[in-house]
Image: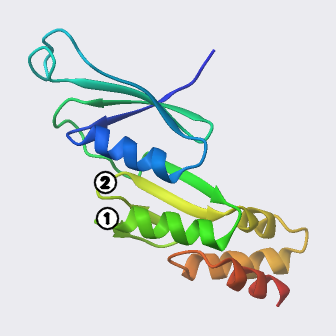
Amino acid sequence: MKVTQHLWFEKDMEAAIGFYTSLIRGSSIHSVSSLPVESPSGPAGSVKIAVFTLGDQHYMAIEAGPLDPFNHSFSIMVECDTQAEIDHLWDALREGGKIEQCGWLQDRWGLSWQIAPKRLGELMNDPDPAKAKRVAEAMLKMVKFDIAELEAVARG
C-alpha cells in the first residue's frame, strides 16, 4: 500500500512544484500530463496532473481551476538539521507569502509550511521537564526558529 498527499492548485501548479522540488533535497517531478477528456473543470487538455516527491514523501497535484483554497488544515513540515537549511527554506518560501508564528508560513500559492529544526523535537522531549518547558515557551515566541537561541534557553 502507498499513501500519497494530493494538492489542488487553481493555477501555476508546474511553477509551484518546480519551486518546491528545487528547494528540498531528494525531490523530483516524475510526470506532468493533461487530462485528455473534458471534465467539470474544463475542456480536454485544460486540467493538468503531476506526480512528484518532496524528500521521501509522495505527492500528486492537479491544476483544475478554483475549488477550495489551501488552509492550515494541511501543511508540510520540514525538519532541518542546520540553521542554514532553515534560513534558506524560510527565505525562499516566504517570498510573496505570509510569515506566521512558530516556524509557520504560507507560500505565494497559499500552502502552509512549518520549517523547524530537528533539534527542537529533541529539546522538547528532554527528560528534564524544566528544560522542556523553557524550550516550549521560547518556541511559542519565535517566528522563524533559531537553533542557537533554543539551545541557549535549554541550557538555562
Circles 2 and 1 in contact, beta carbons < 8 Å:
yes
Looking at the rendered image, the quarter that the N terminus falls into is: top right
Would you name the residue on which mark 1 appears?
A: 97
Mark seen at residue 110:
2
Q: Locate residue 31: give its quadrant.
A: top left
Q: Is residue 7 toward the left or the right of residue 30 in the image?
A: left
Looking at the rendered image, the quarter that the C terminus falls into is: bottom right
The answer to which of 48 and 137 lies nearer the viewer is: 48
Amino acid on which disc 1 is placed? Gly
Q: Is residue 20 toward the left or the right of residue 153 in the image?
A: left
SS under mark 2: loop
Q: Residue furthest right?
A: 127
Residue occupying image coordinates x 74% and y 82%: 134
Res. 99 visible in picture:
yes
Residue occupying image coordinates x 25% and y 25%: 48
The x, y position of residue 100, in whole percent, is 42, 71
The x, y position of residue 80, in whole percent, is 65, 61
The x, y position of residue 74, in whole percent, is 44, 45
Amino acid on which disc 2 is placed? Gly
Residue occupying image coordinates x 90% and y 74%: 128
